[in-house]
Image (cartoon, coloured by chain):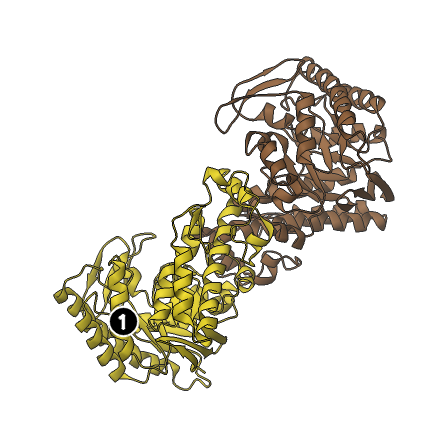
Chain colours: A yellow, B brown
């Protein structure tokens, strides 16, 4: 369990297989986000159909609603959302620090107001770990302190130090909880912080790795408003120092171009709400760049969104029909574009994997970028 | 084509098979409504999965948006909405008379304002027939003048007379359009009117039947606000006089209890937005009556909506999870309840069919009603 087998490399890019209690995952891998225990508009059947292997859910959201006790009474998160594949729960750190409303941070934890009903809650490293254990995902994430993209060094260091202290406490609590379970049914991954400060990031990595034999490591607090070159630079800074034998999860990324860039820089796992959120807004990913389906140019367009795509949306429906659904405010449109966008990222990760195995990722990525970023003429 | 084979009767209730260009339909049959060329929240794959055989679309809505020319350029309505089974288009009469906004009725037709952008449109019997021919449904409906449930006799007679005049014109136009097509790929059905006035209804029926050899006949203008006993009485009045060898379509019905009552009174085909609209509002049909899924009692309820149901919703999800989706505002909930409710009505029609074939419909319906209308204790 929690075994990662590295199968090929191409430059810094890697292809491997991660084995989890609920199934094996080929990397690079895009993981759709089911914040509230559902990937918005998509059913588990849809997720299987688009080739999703790992699905995310969120500790903060499920804790405030319906509450982890309810999920437990309904059989745990897998049964609750009827997803029998691997699950990963984010710890809630990101949400506590990014959602609006009151919060008070101490070294012990965070007191905050629920975005749902304003009720006061407290999350500590121990509580976040316990909640995730009750939810029962294959991968739990350590509780972290996330700072905005533009945070100065002092603020970023403070949050990084706190994150490391919390990581130790998460680790202890997780060891207590998992002790005696054979086979172990949940692993805990640490999250690197340090804002946009390279030295802090490297320190975060060094001190994190020293703490335990992790089965994976996440890079958090990027893609939170910093310019894109900062993200890419940071990945290049980290890459040579990241432990080779474990998977690397870049949190909150990404958009197709970011996913490609991050794979080239040695990242293995990704999650992002972009495919579903943008899909609901009428934006579809295509190999020629994103298109806005409401565009009047598509009114009588009989072509599929993406002729190379094998998803249900592209197999059955014209751009003209999809435009009609959006213009007419029909809910099916939200679902069909979400479905396609998730499939697009999963196929993109698959194509990168194939290129890595051919040791051809640089050329492949260049070509992909040339087409994807060409001037939008559609 | 357009052949109806009556296979069994039980009292006034009938079981048969209607053959249409895009497939055969066993009756009694519930037809889901895809007003704008999509059954709200459901994909064609979902519709097939729940056993839908005929899907409805609406002439008025598709005419004002996206326009029948667009649908034609995108391959016709079947291709447009990716539904290769039988389709029926309502003529737009009901919408013209029920939607808010300006309208002017003459014997020639109706001038009205689009509910979308306020643009002026004119629908005449000829135009409504031409639009439906362009859309290409298996069954087109004659353009009719619908009056509110409480309309007095003079108003109802005026609308009935006008509907009969329009029916002749629809018939002429449809014969011109279909001439030379072999095999004939669309049939036209008349709609009986006459409000809640039995004598007018019988006159409408007599004069309609005298006009042509119809392949089916619809009862319109009921379920528009009149009390339920009026609907049932009217069906009992009409039933002995309806032509036996053709299918009878009761428009806009219905709710489960109305569907059962109408089948007992000799009706064969039904459509209604209730399963999808109520589904989106969180109401689910069950054999023990409707339940409101937001009810706090379902918070930790591990049971499916309906343990006897074979739909995806009931197979995979607990009431507790469905409640969570609604309380959290997740779009998947709208779809899962719509899916179940449509399946519920299709299974109900199937169970009625089986009871008719056993010549047991009265006892079966009594028993079904006893359970369905018991005091809600769930």
Residue B97 position within the rendered picture, expressed as x and y whole percent measured from the top left: 60, 23
Residue B202 position within the rendered picture, expressed as x and y whole percent measured from the top left: 80, 22
Given residues A35 and A345, the one toward you in this image is: A345
Residue B104 position within the rendered picture, expressed as x and y whole percent measured from the top left: 58, 15
User: Residue at point 48% right, 48% down?
Assistant: A334
Image-based side of A138 in relation to B352, left or right = left
Image-based side of A40 in relation to B155, left or right = left
Image-based side of B306 in relation to A203, left or right = right
Tell me if residue A317 can be seen: yes
State the count of labels.
1
Residue B215 position within the rendered picture, expressed as x and y whole percent measured from the top left: 82, 33
Q: Residue A129, relative to residue B258: is it above or below?
A: below
* Picture quadrant of residue B10: top right
* Picture quadrant of residue A197: bottom left
Q: Residue B357, relative to residue B217: is it above or below?
A: below
What residue would you read off at disc 1?
Answer: A236
Given residues B342 and A276, the one toward you in this image is: A276
Q: Which chain is home to disc 1?
A: A
């Amino acid at each position: 369990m929690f075994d990662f087998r590295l199968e090929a490399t191409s430059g810094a890019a890697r292809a491997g297989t991660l084995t989890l209690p609920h199934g094996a995952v080929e990397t690079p891998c895009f993981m759709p986000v089911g914040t509230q225990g559902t990937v918005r508009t998509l059913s588990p059947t849809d997720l299987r159909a688009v080739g999703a292997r790992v699905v995310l859910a969120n500790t903060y959201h499920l804790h405030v609603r319906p509450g982890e006790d309810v999920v437990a009474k309904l059989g745990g998160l897998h049964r609750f959302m009827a997803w029998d594949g691997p699950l990963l729960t984010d710890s809630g750190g990101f949400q506590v620090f990014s959602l609006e409303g009151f919060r008070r941070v101490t070294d012990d934890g965070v007191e905050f107001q629920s975005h749902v009903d304003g009720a006061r809650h407290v999350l500590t490293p121990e509580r976040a770990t316990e909640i995730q254990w009750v939810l029962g995902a294959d991968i739990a994430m350590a509780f972290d302190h996330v700072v905005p993209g533009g945070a100065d060094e002092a603020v970023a260091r403070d949050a990084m130090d706190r994150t490391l202290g919390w990581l130790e406490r998460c680790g202890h609590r997780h060891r207590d909880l998992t002790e005696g379970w054979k086979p172990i049914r949940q692993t805990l991954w640490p999250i690197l912080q340090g804002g946009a400060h390279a030295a802090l990031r490297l320190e975060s990595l060094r001190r994190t790795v020293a703490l335990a034999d992790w089965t994976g490591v996440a890079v958090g607090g990027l893609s939170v408003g910093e310019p894109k070159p900062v993200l890419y630079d940071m990945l290049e800074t980290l890459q040579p120092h990241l432990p080779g034998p474990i998977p690397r999860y870049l949190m909150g990324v990404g958009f197709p171009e970011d996913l490609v860039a991050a794979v080239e820089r040695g990242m293995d796992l990704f999650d992002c709400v972009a495919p579903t959120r943008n899909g609901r807004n009428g934006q579809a990913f295509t190999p020629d760049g994103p298109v806005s389906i409401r565009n009047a140019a598509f009114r009588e367009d009989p072509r599929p969104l993406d002729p190379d795509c094998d998803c249900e949306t592209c197999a059955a429906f014209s751009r003209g029909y999809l435009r009609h659904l959006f213009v007419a405010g029909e809910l099916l449109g939200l679902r069909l574009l979400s479905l396609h966008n998730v499939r697009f990222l999963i196929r993109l990760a698959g194509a990168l994997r194939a290129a890595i195995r051919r040791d051809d990722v640089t050329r492949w990525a260049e070509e992909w970028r040339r087409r994807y970023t060409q001037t939008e003429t559609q």
